[in-house]
Image: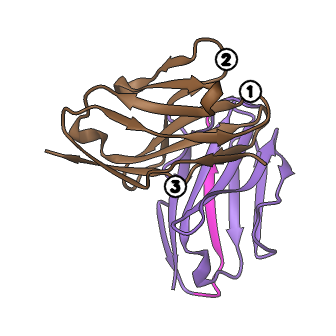
Amino acid sequence: DAGVIQSPRHEVTEMGQEVTLRCKPISGHNSLFWYRQTMMRGLELLIYFNNNVPIDDSGMPEDRFSAKMPNASFSTLKIQPSEPRDSAVYFCASSPGGPDTQYFGPGTRLTVL
Amino acid sequence: AQSVTQPDIHITVSEGASLELRCNYSYGATPYLFWYVQSPGQGLQLLLKYFSGDTLVQGIKGFEAEFKRSQSSFNLRKPSVHWSDAAEYFCAVGSGTYKYIFGTGTRLKVLA
């Protein structure tokens, strides 16, 4: 199994630009999570999808952040416009569902200048 | 409210020495417990998990953890540390739904 795939691995952009992060979950997993990791706040859950439907987006920081899951094998996290405080590592994780193990991708390191 | 505490931010051990990383949780019911490891520049990899049953859980890379309900702890142990174990270790608690609460992590340094 290829595991969770994220792209790009690194992204450097300027403040005000749109950023799109991509994730391909493990085949057969019906739950998908986006997390953000910073030194100050640790790992934070941004949004949770189940069967492609957003179930909990309470962790999305503000309206500049949006996430979609158009099908079972693809999800995007978009930031528009980006700000320097969005600089972090963004992880996608997938799970067979419920309380089961979450499998993490390698992450996207985002730097907003 | 649910919470996870990893009291040690940094730990340094010599290669070949034993290791114990502490994790304490606060949760009303029986939790689902996890240990993940994160190597520099990498994602989180599951080391082991506890859902129910035997309270001593074996994981990958020679790690084990013991669930102690009376102490609300789930400490991670390894009898002999290898230089490749240097990484950051995260304890997580699941509520039985999709939500995990992660600890703040313990960074392990291994001396040759």
Residue identified by numbered label 1: B30
- Amino acid at circle 2: Ser
**Residue found 75% across the figure and 70% down from its top:** A61
Expressed as whole percent of the image width and height from the top left, the position of residue A27 reads 64, 32
Q: Crowding at label 1, few (<14), some or many (≥20) Cα neighbours within 10 Å?
A: some
Q: Is residue A86 left or right of residue B94?
A: left
Residue tagged 2: B52
The reply to whether discs 1 and 2 touch (Cβ–Cβ < 8 Å) is: yes
What residue span does the magenta drawing correspond to? A15-27
- Cα separation, mark 2 vs mark 3, equals 30 Å
Give the CA distance from mark 3 to mark 1: 31 Å
Percent across and percent down for residue A8 are: 51, 61
- Residue drawn at 54 percent across, 54 percent down: B104
Judged from the image, the secondary structure of the residue bearing numbered disc 3 is loop
Q: Which chain is brown?
A: B
Seen from the viewer's position, the closer of residues B79 and B87 is: B79
The image quadrant that residue B78 belongs to is: top left
Task: Give the number of the mark in front: 1 or 2.
Answer: 1
Q: Secondary structure at mark 2?
A: loop
Please report the residue visible at 76 percent of the width from the left and 36 percent of the height from the top. Answer: B95
B75 left or right, relative to A55: left
**Residue name at image x 53 percent, y 46 percent:** A105
Task: Give how far across and how far down residue A16 sits, in percent.
Answer: 65, 87
Q: Give amino acid for label 3.
A: Gly
Frontmost of labels 2 and 3 is: 2
Per the model, the C-alpha gap separating discs 1 and 2 is: 8 Å
- Sequence-wise first label, 1 or 2: 1
User: Which chain is indicated by disc 1?
Assistant: B
The disc at residue A107 is 3
Q: Amino acid at mark 1?
A: Thr
Graded by Cα atoms within 10 Å as few (under 14), some (14 to 19) or many (20 or more), the crowding at tag 2 reads: few
Residue B1 — which label? none
